[in-house]
Image: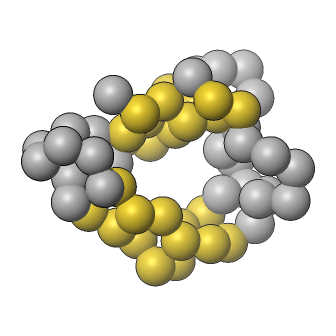
């Protein structure tokens, strides 16, 4: 699990470029799962990074 750097606390994009079909997981400050990406390849041009504190790529 990787901590998100300060400054990514608003809108932004993400691109899941892992192995085909693999998801990434986003967690809040309490390390509670709040979002699972669709399987790779997938993306969101307007993601909300506000509640995200950690990301785990699998």
Image coordinates of residue 39 in percent, x first then y, are 19, 48
Please state which of residues 50 and 56 is positioned toward the viewer in this rendering: 56
Judging from the image, the colouring scheme is secondary structure
Can you name the residue that lies furthest to the bottom here?
Answer: 45
Quadrant of the frame with the N terminus: top right
> Taking 7 as reference, is 51 above or below it?
above
Q: Position of residue 4 (x, y in %)?
A: 72, 42
Quarter that holds the C terminus: top left
Residue 32 in sight from this viewpoint = yes
* As drawn, 51 above or below 27: below
Residue 2 vs residue 38, the one in the foreground: 2
- Residue pictured at 40% horizontal, 63% vertical: 15
Query: In the shown orientation, is residue 31 left or right of residue 38?
Result: right
Residue 34 is at least partly visible in this image: no
Asked if residue 23 lies left or right of residue 32, the reply is left
**Count of numbered badges drawn on the protein:** 0
Q: Position of residue 18 (x, y in %)?
A: 28, 46
Residue drawn at x 67%, y 72% is 11
Residue 13 locus on image (x, y percent):
53, 71
Residue furthest left as drawn = 20
Determine the residue positioned at 80% across, 46% down: 5
Please report the residue visible at 46 percent of the width from the left and 79 percent of the height from the top.
45
Answer above or below: position of 13 versus 26: below
């Amino acid at each position: 699990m990787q901590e998100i750097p300060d400054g990514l606390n608003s809108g932004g994009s993400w691109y899941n470029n892992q192995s085909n079909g693999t998801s990434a997981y986003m967690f809040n400050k309490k390390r509670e799962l709040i979002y699972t990406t669709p399987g790779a390849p997938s993306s969101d041009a307007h993601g909300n990074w506000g509640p995200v504190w950690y990301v785990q790529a699998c």
